[in-house]
Amino acid sequence: MSNIDFGANNFSFSVYIVNKPTMLEYQNLGDVTTLVEGDINVINQAYGNGWRKVFNVYAK
């Protein structure tokens, strides 16, 4: 299985979410991509409460 999305390459726990942000920079991911400072805020601003809840739940 290949891992394509956000996170750390050395993860021990993963969560599969069918939908991903439709932002252009995330459409052609080919591997696990580490988010950099500010990325979560940009996604929250663009997509609202749904993604904010996802990040908050998994940050705890």
Image (cartoon, rainbow, N blue to C red):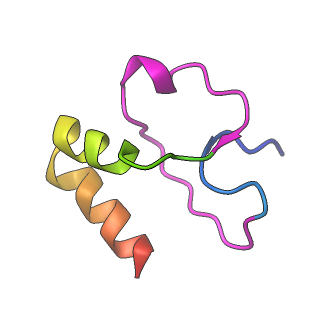
Q: Position of residue 44 (x, y in %)?
A: 23, 47
Tell me what residue is drawn at x 35 percent, y 49 percent: 40
Res. 21 image quadrant: top left
- Judge whether residue 47 is colored magenta: no
Taken as a whole, is the magenta stretch helix, strand or loop?
Answer: loop
The answer to which of 32 and 15 lies nearer the viewer is 32
Tell me what residue is drawn at x 31 percent, y 70 percent: 56
Res. 60 image quadrant: bottom left
Q: In the rendered view, would you say 11 is above or below 28?
A: below
Tell me what residue is drawn at x 56 percent, y 55 percent: 16
Q: Position of residue 42 (x, y in %)?
A: 28, 39
Residue 51 shown left or right of residue 58 in the figure: left
The answer to which of 2 and 59 lies nearer the viewer is 59
Residue 41 shown left or right of residue 8 in the figure: left
Q: In the rendered view, would you say 37 is above or below 2?
A: below
The residue furthest bottom is: 60
Tell me what residue is drawn at x 35 percent, y 74 percent: 57
Residue 13 shown left or right of residue 49 in the figure: right
- Judge whether residue 18 is colored magenta: yes
Residue 48 shown left or right of residue 13 in the figure: left
The residue furthest front is: 37
Magenta-tinted stretch: 11-33
Q: Position of residue 58 (x, y in %)?
A: 43, 72
Q: How many marks?
A: 0
The answer to which of 45 and 1 lies nearer the viewer is 45
The residue furthest right is: 1
Res. 54 image quadrant: bottom left
Q: Classify the position of the N terminus by image quarter.
A: top right
Q: In the rendered view, would you say 58 is above or below 52?
A: below
Q: Position of residue 13 (x, y in %)?
A: 67, 72
